[in-house]
Amino acid sequence: MSIVESSSGKSPFDFALENFEIAADVLDLSEGDRVKLRSPERILIVSVPIQMDSGEVRSFTGYRVQHSTSRGPGKGGIRYHPNVTLEEVKALTMWMTWKCAVVNIPFGGAKGGITCNPKQMSQNEIERMTRRYTHAIHPIIGPDTDIPAPDVYTNSQVMAWIMDTFSMARGRLVPGVVTGKPVHIGGSLGRNEATGRGVFNTIECACPHLRMHLKGSKVVVQGFGNAGAITAQLLDSAQADVIAVSDSSGCIFTKDGLHIAKLIQFKETTGSVVGFPGSETITAEELLALDCDILVPAAMKNMIDANNASSIRAKMVAEAANGPITPEADAILEKKGVFVIPDILCNAGGVTVSYFEWVQNEQHLSWDLQEVNSRLETIMQRSFSQVLDIHLERKTSMRTAANALAIQRVCDTNRSRGLYP
């Protein structure tokens, strides 16, 4: 199954619109309000020609999409992946609008990407591609307009190249044009762990509501990249038992719980979790069907769909990935009584600390790690409580509650600002 389409043939943007309409119905939004939020404000598609190390000239397709900038500059990552499409980027930018609004930070939603396979490219080729892409999208990005960040297969080094290219074009240093930079050139402490830490914060908040104890709980993590590994590490530190994890190479399981610190070191050495001493290999289907307390989908979108949702036995699903559950699967999980912490809330730690980085850049400040983590925890706890209140009051799913909170905030801004001219 591609990351772009589910087994139903629908695109991620179709799913984003479905969830939007569900929340819009709960809010009883007018057609005028809906019209303004169904489509992105701006779509830029660019050609990115570069010279490969072989001397061959190849051209890649790049995108930068801004869904809504009514509450502040666009905010969202840039991904390098062979399956990047416009429909995927449009969905991600809509989700970014809701994500920024649900945690009430003054950003709108944006997203970008290049259709390429960085695993088959040298570091020099990736740098040339990044700088050419930055030049192409330069007119619509900036610290007051649209602020990119790392995403799938991009990192702090890619952000440094974007910042440098943009700054050279402006003739001055502009650190606030991107977040997720190396700390020594204006990045924020805690940014690398922020998404996983935010996931952990929301899981901590959900446990008392579900009358669960985090200590001794059984956890399954699908996807052992940055977000998944950090989440697993924090859960392990809280004495939860992470019994299974997966990455792009396969899935491993042990009933007594994995030693997460050693597993992280093992993957750094071998490139995969598969073959970790003391574990057994299982299938992706078996991983999702494991009897556990908490399931953390931290891989790609549409991984839980109508075909496998009924096999899930977790009491709680914490969406560390963007859009890992299709609307059809959502309905199945809700009927089963599974408590889902939706992605726009659960994994908003990354964009929240990106906001902190931007604030530090704009004010020429540097916060210590304790301050960053304390501010993040406060925002995640407050946002979870606000979404839970709507969930209980309106007797709707947590996803619809989170979307409703976010959409209401964006609509309130749009109504106050009005239409120009």
Image: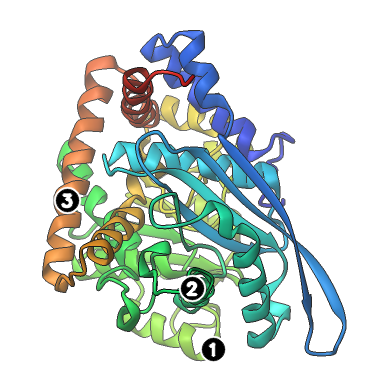
Distance from the alpha carbon under mark 2 to that under mark 3: 35 Å
- Which x, y percent locates residue 413? 33, 25
Circle 2 residue: 155
- Residue shown at the point (45%, 87%) measured from the top left: 266
Circle 1 residue: 270
Q: Earlier in the sequence, mark 1 or mark 2?
A: 2
- Residue shown at the point (49%, 25%) measured from the top left: 20
Amino acid carrying label 1: it is: Thr
Res. 311 visible in picture: no
- Residue shown at the point (39%, 74%) measured from the top left: 173
Query: On the rendered structure, is 145 left or right of 58?
Result: left
Give the SS element for disc 2.
loop
Q: Residues within 10 Å of mark 3 (few under 14, many from 20)?
A: few
- Residue shown at the point (74%, 36%) measured from the top left: 9
- Which x, y percent locates residue 166? 51, 69
Which of the two discs, 3 and 1, sits closer to the camera?
Answer: 1
Give the SS element for disc 3.
loop
Amino acid carrying label 3: it is: His
Circle 3 residue: 213
Q: Residues within 10 Å of mark 1 (few under 14, many from 20)?
A: few
Query: Which of the 4 quarters of the picture holds residue 138?
Result: bottom right
| As drawn, 64 above or below 118 | above
Q: Earlier in the sequence, mark 3 or mark 1?
A: 3
| As drawn, 236 above or below 111 | below
